Amino acid sequence: MDTFATNLKNTGYPYTVWHHMKNCKNIVLFPNNPLIFGNKAKIAWLEIDPDTYRVWSFLDTGERGATELILGEDIAAINDFLTGFWMGVEVSVWSTASFSLVLDKWSEIKTCAHGFARSLASYLEAATQPKEALTPNTEKIQAGLSGNIPGIAGLSSFNYDCISSQELQKQLQEDAEAQAWTFEEGKEILDSSSTFKELGQNTWDKFKEKYLGFTNGFKKGVDWYFGG
């Protein structure tokens, strides 16, 4: 966590945030961008104790937030994320090796392999039923690979062409924006919570939607491999 803490410090995050991270031993779910309330940027994050699966929320003031949950069935969402992450790394290795057979410049190989691996992530996302499910519907994925589901291209019509670096950066930016917290989302959570317990649960549910699950893990694994 020392590197993460240093990055936060260099980016301009408050002392209470990066100093806490420097000594943190938990699994941290940290948003890409702060939440903007009016003209002020606020940050909050979740931490998961790897031994007890207890979830804590923290605020940028250094105070512990309202969330204190014991993960039960939610452990599955974390396992799905970790499985997806590992598969994303494996696909990235395979994708890089494949494009290195037909291209010479590393910059081109990296862009093409990264874009192709991400396109598989988008495919998995499209093959998830329902859309917000945290695990892929394997039967639907298999049918989609065979070209038997309308709206999902089979492997025979899959696009293996390289995408441009501009298009890749656009995809990365769109994902970063989708995972950033908005004022409207924060307000929705507050308005739908009548107790601290409900506030904690609603916040955790939104975190699961934004950051956990198989497809999110897959994309993170791909982007991590290519240095994103």
Image: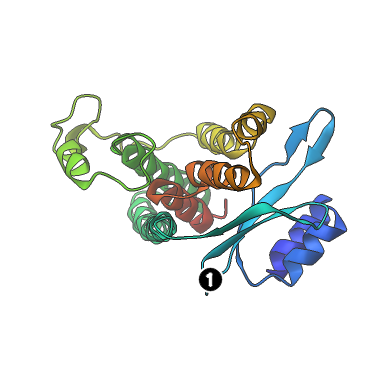
Report the front residue among 105 and 202.
Answer: 202
For label 1, the crowd category at 10 Å Cα-Cα, with few meaning under 14, some 14 to 19 and many 20 or more, is few
Where's the N terminus, which quadrant? bottom right
Q: Determine which quarter of the picture holds residue 141.
A: top left
Q: Is residue 109 visible?
A: no
The residue sitting at the front extreme is: 195
The percent position of residue 21, horizontal first and vertical second, equals 73, 65
Q: Tell me what residue is drawn at x 31 percent, y 35 percent.
A: 130
Report the front residue among 104 and 117.
Answer: 117
Q: Is residue 18 visible?
A: yes
Report the front residue among 78 and 126.
Answer: 78
24 to the left or right of 18: left
The percent position of residue 176, horizontal first and vertical second, equals 59, 39
208 to the left or right of 61: left
The percent position of residue 55, horizontal first and vertical second, equals 58, 60
Q: Amino acid at mark 1?
A: Pro
Reading the image, the residue beneath label 1 is 50
Q: Name the element at disc 1.
A: loop
The percent position of residue 162, horizontal first and vertical second, equals 40, 38
Q: Tell me what residue is drawn at x 72 percent, y 70 percent.
A: 2
